[in-house]
Amino acid sequence: MEYYQLIPRMQFSVNMVHLKEHCAQSIRNICELYDIPASNSVTEKLQSIISEPKVSHNTLLALFFLLFNLDTTMKHNMMQAEPTATQKKITHFAINIRDIVIPDYMNTESQRVMAFVDNCTDAWSNA
């Protein structure tokens, strides 16, 4: 899988196939990292979202950012693929979404997926 400039590339809807692949791989990584069976109901639900033919780019991008928060394998692979300046950006972004963006999203019942994706995108731009 290609990890160079992954976050900016996933923001373009023309990369839907790659976004689905990275989300599916991330779920496998998380299952392996945390010893979660692939037959877990949550895992199966996430896989069904990814495989849904009419899933929106924003829904997948939101899932990608949520998975990124948990998937240390993906973060490691991204860090290996990037120069030092971008590694610092990835680190800052990861901390920002972990400490601010995701908790804000989880605490606000009325916040929509689009707003969450916008906040993640802004966090990346400002990292």
Image (tube, grey):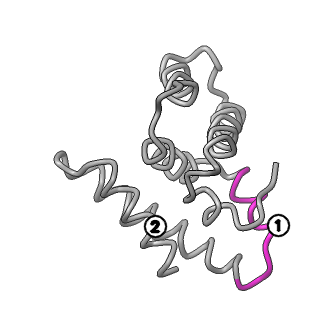
Q: What secondary structure do most residues of the magenta stretch adopt? A: helix
Q: How many C-alpha atoms fall within 10 Å of the one at disc 2: few (<14), some, or many (≥20)? A: some
Q: State yes or no: residue 75 in magenta.
A: yes
Mark in front: 1 vs 2: 2
Task: Provide the secondary structure element on which disc 1 rests.
Answer: helix
Tell me residue 79's x, y (percent): 76, 67
Q: State yes or no: residue 3 in magenta.
A: no
Q: Earlier in the sequence, mark 1 or mark 2?
A: 1
Tell me residue 64's x, y (percent): 55, 47
User: Disc 1 marks which amino acid?
Assistant: Ala
Which of the two residues, 122 or 74, is positioned nearer the viewer here?
Answer: 122
Write down the region rendered in magenta: 73-85
Q: Residue at x 63, y 38 (%)?
A: 20
In this figure, which residue is indicated by the disc labeled 2? 121
In this figure, which residue is indicated by the disc labeled 1? 81
> In this image, 127 relative to 9: left or right?
left
Q: Residue at x 55, y 76 (%)?
A: 92
> In this image, 50 relative to 113: left or right?
right
Q: How many C-alpha atoms fall within 10 Å of the one at disc 1: few (<14), some, or many (≥20)? A: some
User: Disc 2 marks which amino acid?
Assistant: Thr
Task: Provide the secondary structure element on which disc 2 rests.
Answer: helix
Query: Which residue of the protein is positioned furthest toward the left in this rendering?
Result: 110
Vertical order, 65 against 42 (above or below): below
> In this image, 80 relative to 105: left or right?
right
Disc number for residue 116 = none
Q: Residue at x 16, y 48 (%)?
A: 110
Q: Residue at x 57, y 58 (%)?
A: 12
Which of the two residues, 51 or 3, is positioned nearer the viewer here?
Answer: 51
Tell me residue 97's x, y (percent): 45, 63
> In this image, 68 relative to 77: left or right?
left
Q: Are marks 1 and 2 in contact (CB under 8 Å)?
A: no
